[in-house]
Image: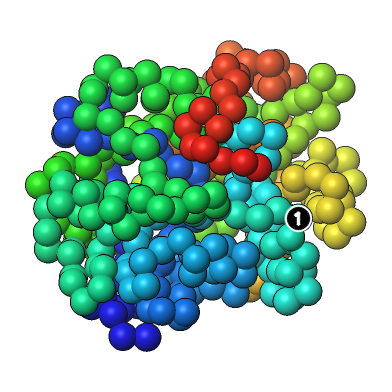
Amino acid sequence: MDLPVMPPLAPMLAKSVKEIPDAGHVEPKWDGFRTIVFKDGDEIELGSRNERPMTRYFPELVAALRENLPARCVIDGEIILTADGRLDFDALQQRIHPAASRVAMLAETTPASFVGFDLLAVGDERLMEEPFADRRRGLEEALAAASDPVFITPATADLAEARDWFTRFEGAGLDGVVAKPLDGTYQPDKRTMFKIKHERTADCVVAGFRWHKTGGIVGSLLLGLYDGEGRLHHVGVAASFPMARRASLVAELEPLVADDLSVHPWGEWADQEAHQSARLPGAVSRWNAGKNLSFVPLRPELVVEVAYDHMEGDRFRHTAQFRRWRPDRTPESCTYEQLESPDGLDLSEILPISR
């Protein structure tokens, strides 16, 4: 492979803002795997956000990119997977599997798509130092003949339309919009774009915590919500605390430590079979087999208010943000019923996707 821009390359990032800026260009924020595609003839490499190649996990996409992209190019975008007319990040995560036979089977049963949103090189021309407006025009030319499952992201310069997208597109599983300055150059690993995401709050039961990787302080609080049958489900974690606060949490949580897992709502976490049918906090990390996801169980008596952007199935899609303790709420009142559900929207109204 010999391109003007070579792997590995860290993608350009976005910083969170509260309102959509009038930057002249706004796109949907895709909820998938950020990917930079490097193509030199038949050679293709899919670079991830952590700069590790993901090529082997998406053979069907490699074939589609080989057919739909210019002969030599570097394109920044997102690998997505859809089901029932909306994005399905859970199914996308399942695509990362060590067994070649499993990879081949999933490529057939849950094929992925690619949405391009920036052109970093084409032919022998390096474009990273060019303004985004020029790169976008080049991307439109490069993907003019592309077809499903390779797409160019929709974009608008109309702030009113961008606000409408922010509201409506959530129904198809998107988690906000991204605004890009038209005169901006491509700056790897720099937060020079702007992302606007949904933020809501929920009252959750704290039923455990994990130790911080440095040891001796709290790493994350494990959050739960009750379903209609009185079962406490693990819905995610809250983990954004200053180091001093992590240390003080140890003493605050110590009186609630539950020594007997047999009476804890998540006592079955050590049963590997349970992880095949439920979201439990002791599961092995798909991304890092050596990561310790065991937890310290707490009696489910403490209620916390957290901020979250959106749900993926029955869990928070991203790490929730601690807001305050809620001593005025009973744990049993923390149910799924409090969560907002956006109006449904079929993804085909955003992309001409056929699956």
Quarter of the image with the C terminus is top right
Q: Residue at x 47, y 79 (%)?
A: 42
Assess disc 1: are there few (<14), some (14-19) or many (≥20) residues with their C-alpha within 10 Å of its C-alpha.
Answer: few
**Residue 325 or 78: which is nearer the viewer?**
78
Q: In the displayed structure, does residue 153 sit left or right of residue 332?
A: left
Residue closest to the far bottom: 1
Residue placed under numbered mark 1 in the picture: 109
Residue 35's place in the image compared with 173, above or below, is below
Q: Is residue 38 left or right of residue 278?
A: left
Classify the position of the N terminus by image quarter. Answer: bottom left
Work out whether 69 lies above or below 318: below
Residue 308 picture location, percent across and down = 49, 31
Give how far across and how far down residue 44 sits, in percent.
Answer: 46, 75
Rendered position, 8 above or below 297: below
Q: Quadrant of residue 203?
A: top right
Q: Nearer the viewer, residue 16 or 123?
A: 123
Q: Residue at x 68, y 50 (%)?
A: 91
Q: Which residue is at a point 70% across and 53% down the rendered structure image? A: 110
The answer to whether residue 184 shows anywhere in this view is no
Q: Nearer the viewer, residue 80 or 139?
A: 139
Q: In this rendering, would 170 be left or right of 191? A: right
Q: Secondary structure at mark 1?
A: helix
Taking the image as shown, residue 91 lies to the left or right of residue 245, namely right
